[in-house]
């Protein structure tokens, strides 16, 4: 009797399933298309305790204040829509939509040196 042996066909089946799952995992991490210059700053996000409107409150990935970054925090979107500051075509606040307002410059507040 060889009851303890796993049949080779079963082993192959298990490996095939594991292989498929791995493939699916790698598919689920789409890379955001970003200009090369921005990619270095892609993960610079404000600390959670950053004060709104300060130098620290800045989303390096999207070049807007982190507290106003609808791409990092979609919960902000209804607030922009409520004030009619919303570009439906680009899915951005109108005040942050560089496609509609190419001259728009969103400036990061200067660092305050006080201690
Ligand atoms: Zn952001
Ligand atoms: Zn727009």
Image (cartoon, rainbow, N blue to C red):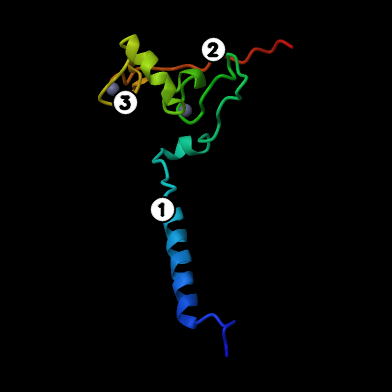
- Label 2 SS: loop
Q: Nearer the viewer, residue 11 or 115?
A: 11
Residue 48, x across and y down, in percent: 60, 23
Residues at circles 3 and 1 in contact by the CB criterion of under 8 Å: no
The local crowd at label 3, few if under 14, some if 14 to 19, many if 20 or more residues have their Cα within 10 Å, is few
State which tag comes first along the sequence, 2 or 3.
2
Q: Outermost residue, bottom direction?
A: 1
Residue 15, x across and y down, in percent: 48, 71
Mark 3 C-beta closer than 8 Å to ligand 2 = no
82 versus 26 height, above or below: above
Task: Tell me the quadrant of ligand 2.
Answer: top left
Residue 95 shows in this picture? no
Q: Outermost residue, front direction?
A: 1
Residue indicated by mark 3: 91
Quarter where residue 53 is shown: top right
State which tag comes first along the sequence, 2 or 1.
1
**Residue at (30% x, 24% y) in the render:** 99
Q: Is residue 27 left or right of residue 65?
A: left
Residue indicated by mark 2: 53
Residue indicated by mark 1: 27
Residue 44, x across and y down, in percent: 55, 31
Front tag of 3 and 1: 1
Q: Nearer the viewer, residue 27 or 37?
A: 27
113 versus 63 height, above or below: above
- Label 3 SS: loop
The span from disc 2 to disc 3 (Cα, nearest Å) is 23 Å
**Residue at (51% x, 28% y) in the render:** 60
Residues at circles 2 and 3 in contact by the CB criterion of under 8 Å: no
């Amino acid at each position: 009797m060889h009851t303890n042996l796993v049949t080779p066909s079963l082993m192959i089946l298990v490996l095939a399933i594991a292989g498929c799952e791995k493939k699916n995992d790698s598919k689920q991490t789409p890379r955001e298309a970003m200009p090369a210059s921005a990619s270095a700053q892609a993960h610079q996000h404000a600390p959670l305790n950053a004060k709104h409107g300060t130098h620290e409150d800045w989303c390096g990935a999207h070049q807007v204040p982190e507290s106003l970054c609808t791409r990092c925090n979609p919960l902000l979107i209804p607030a922009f829509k409520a004030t009619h500051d919303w570009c439906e075509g680009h899915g951005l606040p109108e005040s942050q939509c560089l496609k509609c307002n190419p001259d728009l410059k969103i400036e990061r507040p200067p660092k305050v040196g006080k201690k």
